[in-house]
Image (cartoon, rainbow, N blue to C red):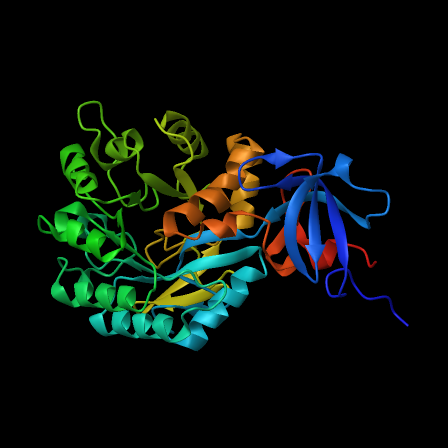
Amino acid sequence: MTEPSVLTGPSRYWLCPDQLFDGETLLSDAALLVEDGQSVRIAPRAKLSPRDRQEPVAGTLVPGFIDLQVNGGGGALLNYQPTPAGIRTILAAHRRFGTMALLPTVITDRPEVLDAAADAVIALWPTPGMLGLHIEGPHIALARKGTHSADFIRPLDSRTMDVVGRLRAAGVPVLITLAPEAVAPGQIASLVRMGAVVSLGHTDATNDQMKAALAEGARSVTHLHNAMPPMLNRAPGAVGAAINSDAYLGFICDGHHVHDDMLALSIRARPVADHMFLVSDAMPTVGGPDRFELYGQEIRLSEGRLINAEGSLAGAHVTMAEGVHRLVNVIGIAPAEALKMAITVPARLIGADALASPVGRSLSDLLVLDRTYAMTGGLADTVPHA
């Protein structure tokens, strides 16, 4: 008879990894108690009794990654499949690559698409791994639309406010990306009173406009540097205002969207710690085919970049796991800091703090990273049988 796996057997034992990330630091002498497939608590390995069953784990044990900007995956794009089935496909695709929780993201489109995406999220709420809904556009700057369609861009209106209100009434977390110049005074404050997280992005805003939006309650900035003007010596603009603020700043780390040196500089320049978070901005090609349709155009994968017919970037083909690996090995970020950017900080911003801890979790939500902080797999792939 085959021995039961430590992942499924009704037993009590201690996982003893080379390192354990507890949400804040990397512990090299820690053990994680498991009871009936759930992690229970962390203890120093030195305090374990010889009678305690111990299972070694080669590598670094971490909670699954948390991604607050996911447009698609597994061949599904939320704008084109704003349904419970489409969301489940996206969740499953990213889970394969270590992202255990995410915000499905609907970008600029017809109002009916946003309505359908909200309906789908409400129908699924709560579903493990789905953190709410990220509404990115259509209330953005035309000049900084990126791959978003100009046909649907408009100022923030009552229809979107009603969708946010409906989501919040159902208890669904909402992150909404908008440009300061696309809203009227007081509208950001109204969204904040509803409980939405307002993020600034796709904007041509001046330094003063950004500061005013942040003062009104915006707490975040969407994919720093992308879809915003560069800093100049007498015009810090959106980027300068963001970096100098205490807001949470999302960023893409794929080597294409932001130059590695610029990203390193931006991270070092922040006046507050633990306010940078990694996103993928992933499209359907993650875990899916190498091309898809957006606004009637074919978007294809070419040398790691997703490009449209004009050769412009159109979303990203990268996973959170790849982003963490690049942060450590290319950007030079300390491993614990990189892990916080991919787990702890996004969890805090969206109000899912418990997901930053390895305690109180199903073992299927935990990952193992190798010495270079590349993902080797989940525990099922790495822990030997009992």
Please, is residue 266 above or below residue 185 in the view? above
Q: Is residue 84 left or right of residue 2?
A: left
Residue in view at x 55 percent, y 30 percent? 334
The image quadrant that residue 372 belongs to is: top right
The location of residue 134, given as percent across then percent down, is 33, 59
Q: Is residue 351 left or right of residue 357?
A: left
The image quadrant that residue 294 belongs to is: bottom left
In the image, 159 versus 173, the foreground residue is 173
The location of residue 42, given as percent across then percent down, is 65, 44
The image quadrant that residue 104 belongs to is: bottom left
Q: For the N terminus, give its image quadrant.
A: bottom right
Q: Is residue 89 left or right of residue 240?
A: right
Please, is residue 43 above or below residue 89 in the view? above
In the picture as drawn, the residue positioned furthest to the left comes out as 185
Residue 58 seen from this side: yes
In the image, 354 versus 206, the foreground residue is 354
The location of residue 58, given as percent across then percent down, is 75, 44
